[in-house]
Image (cartoon, grey):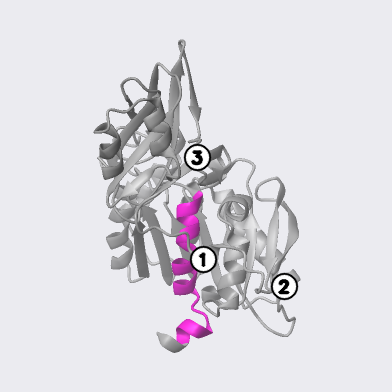
Amino acid sequence: MTGALRELLESHPDGAKVDAWMKGRHFPIVEGKCATFVWRGHADAVKLRHFIFGLESAQDLTRLENTDLWHLSLEIPPESRVEYKFEVHRGGHSEWIEDPLNGQRARDPFGANSVLQGEGYVVPEWTRPDPRVRPGRLVPLSLRSAALGGERRGHIYLPARLRASRRYSLVVVHDGSDYLNYAGMKTVLDNLIDRLEIPELIVAFVDSPDRLLEYANHAQHARFLTEELVPHLYERFPLRNTPRARCLMGASFGGVAALSTAVSYPGFWGRVLVQSGSFAFTDIGDHNHRGPLFDPVVAFMNGFRAAPSAVTEKIFMSCGVYESLIYENRSLVPLLTETGMQVRFVEARDGHNWENWRDRLREGLSWLYPGPLLMVYE
């Protein structure tokens, strides 16, 4: 329990004392590794719904007697980021709501969550727009794919000082629109390039109309990326034509697509960046507890685990320790390393979400493609 909550409990509170106690405070209250969540209002029950794997996903708040204030204290390790909602029950109905006392929000394709920032966590300044930085630009991408049988769309990021006489490395990003909208990746690229932490890059943000099918070790998707998209981009832009100048990246199922495409075309993609890859596998049988959507992933991972091989030069992986996928990602690291590939794996006290992936972009991109600043000091 936080000291602030203990102070309130020992005051024999009523409504007026709660009003005074809440005035000027930030919620949730964070003191060291303890956090107190607070909700105020009339309800039959209130639960905290968080996304920390390993803890009960729904935890009851306790109503303070003679008041309408509800509270729950949890141990939250320093530097954590935790996304959550409240589940409020009234009159036989329930709803999930964002925390009205907390202005911190994280957005994703499904809406928004409230965010608890543990002690020591700071939003990286290089994720924020900087008016002093000369911005790159996004141009539309549209390509008809024979492999996939339809049009694929997205955007191409071009650095601010693009020159036709120069040659650039290419990064292809799965779930491209989500990386732009929810991870702020254009701003990250602008800032890291301006700081000379990464070189100027050309980045293809591609989308899929059926990512759960096409990202799950899908041969036609790998063919589209390697045999159609890359040649198309080479015709349009001044790209360096070497494996180390070609990078595939993605998160979750997009991470599976990045690795499985590299496995399908060994040696073609010289860099891979994977965030919270959905690397489900089994030791017995062909079906994972995650359900039939993962069956193609399980087949791919079981096959790769049985005969691992070096398919790229460098691979960067990250995963949140509050994700259910942390076990699969950790177990993959020694397997990849033993093949001779250069592997860097980073963990963070965060979950399966876009701001976790945003916060790891600097380390991943600058390790795969160190800019002039880092090449001097490393």
Residue hosting label 3 = 113
Residue 62: in sight, yes or no? Answer: yes
Viewer-nearest of discs 3 and 2: 3
Query: 108 left or right of 163?
Result: left
Question: Magenta region: which residues?
Answer: 354-375
- Sequence-wise, the earlier of marks 3 and 2 is 3
- Sequence-wise, the earlier of marks 1 and 2 is 1
Residue hosting label 2 = 237
Q: Amino acid under label 1?
A: Glu
Marks 3 and 2, how far apart in space? 39 Å
- Sequence-wise, the earlier of marks 1 and 3 is 3
Residue hosting label 1 = 125
Q: Nearer the viewer, residue 18 or 2?
A: 18
Residue at (36% x, 67% y) in the render: 344
Q: Amino acid under label 3?
A: Asn
Marks 1 and 2, how far apart in space? 31 Å
The correct choice, above or below, for 208 with respect to 222 in the image is: above
Callout 3 environment at 10 Å: few (<14), some (14 to 19), or many (20+)? many
Residue at (64% x, 51% y) in the render: 177
Query: 3 left or right of 80?
Result: left
Q: Nearer the viewer, residue 371 or 102?
A: 102
Image quadrant holding the C terminus, namely: bottom left
Q: Amino acid under label 2?
A: Phe
Query: 41 left or right of 302?
Result: right
The correct choice, above or below, for 66 with respect to 273 in the image is: above
Secondary structure category for the residue under label 3: strand
